[in-house]
Image (cartoon, helix red, strand yellow):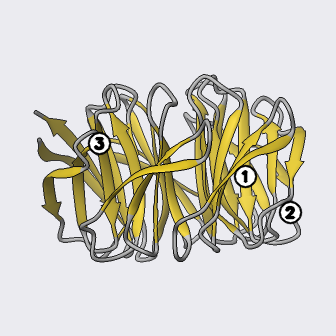
Amino acid sequence: MILEEVDRFQLGQDQIMAVGILDSRAYLAASWNGRVAARDPGRRKTEEVVVADGSACSGLAVASSDAGIAVTTFAGGVHLLDPETLHQRKQVRLSQSALTCAAISTDRQIFAFGGRRPEIVCVRASDLSTICRFDGHHDWLEALAFQPESRILAAGDQTGDIRIWSIREQKERHLLQGHRGAVMALAWSPAGAQIASGGHDKIIRLWNPEDGSMIGQLTGHKSTVRGLAFLGGGQTLISASQDRTIRFWDVAARMQTASFTTDDQWLTALALDNRGKLMVTGSLVGVVRLLAIKD
């Protein structure tokens, strides 16, 4: 694999909390400084807004180029932004404490948000109306991820627990335990047959979501794992870490196949486009990069 930088921009000097790819025309970042930016790499143009409550942004989830972008804040608010202009369409207060992470179902119908309370709130993407709430974690949430083509949600928290929730049944399905320290990143394989998790203990763990068993682990990172994404059919896993590296892993062989060291101070966020050709990363000091993935 080869990583080639396509574009970059600076969103202040604070930590990038979340990144995303809207479409081929724009990629996104949300910062601790309370700003959200959309960047057009072709025109080298960046649009920035300050979220309405002025507090630090914590999470970002892209519904679609039509439905909007949801941004969470440490004031407990969710802001639904217009993808073209970043103007606010709707704002709701979902928690009395900080919201810390966000996810969108693959059919783009449901947002899930987690926070320090700790509680998961699932809402309709169309109007942010509440569908259900899950209260079972023992510390605040750090990572959320939906199983592809389903209403199953994985949630990782500060204790190291990962809980699998069914939105249709509105109950917990499995508890996955093994991490020591916070779970900071989660990813489902494209077919939904595996979950990858990473966090403070520097180890990437692979899980069977059907019974909650751990089926493998990947070691090599020297600091907290902050981003995970499966590539292609799920044979390859990409990870981003505070050790400044992006690593590629052969999932079946449980081995690293490539490693790239960046000049960023900590990598804090990772997102892929739907084709697995473009990657966005965020850093501790506000740098956002768009990278092309080549064989």
User: Where 184 falls versus 89 (above or below)?
Assistant: below
Residue 161, disc: none
User: Where 103 falls versus 77 (above or below)?
Assistant: above
Whether residue 240 is visible to the viewer of this picture, yes or no, is yes
Residue 168 x/y as whole percent: 83, 29
Residue 106 x/y as whole percent: 59, 27
Residue beneath the point at 66% across and 26% down:
150
Residue 113, disc: 1
Residue 259 x/y as whole percent: 15, 57
Name the residue carrying label 3. Answer: 251
The CA distance from mark 2 to mark 1 is 10 Å
Q: Looking at the picture, which amino acid does disc 1 mark?
A: Phe
Residue beneath the point at 41% across and 46% down:
271
From the viewer's side, name the closer residue of 80 and 255.
255
Name the residue carrying label 2. Answer: 95
Q: Is residue 147 left or right of residue 41?
A: right
Mark 2 in CB contact with mark 1 (< 8 angstroms): yes
Q: Earlier in the sequence, mark 2 or mark 1?
A: 2
Q: Looking at the picture, which amino acid does disc 3 mark?
A: Val
Quarter the N terminus occupies: top left
Q: Earlier in the sequence, mark 2 or mark 3?
A: 2
Q: What is the secondary structure assignment of the residue under circle 2?
A: loop
Residue 261 x/y as whole percent: 15, 65
Q: What is the secondary structure assignment of the residue under circle 3?
A: loop
Q: What is the secondary structure assignment of the residue under circle 1?
A: strand
Q: How many C-alpha atoms fall within 10 Å of the one at disc 1: few (<14), some, or many (≥20)? A: many
* Foreground disc of the pair 2, 3: 3
Q: Is residue 227 left or right of residue 79?
A: left
Q: Earlier in the sequence, mark 3 or mark 1?
A: 1
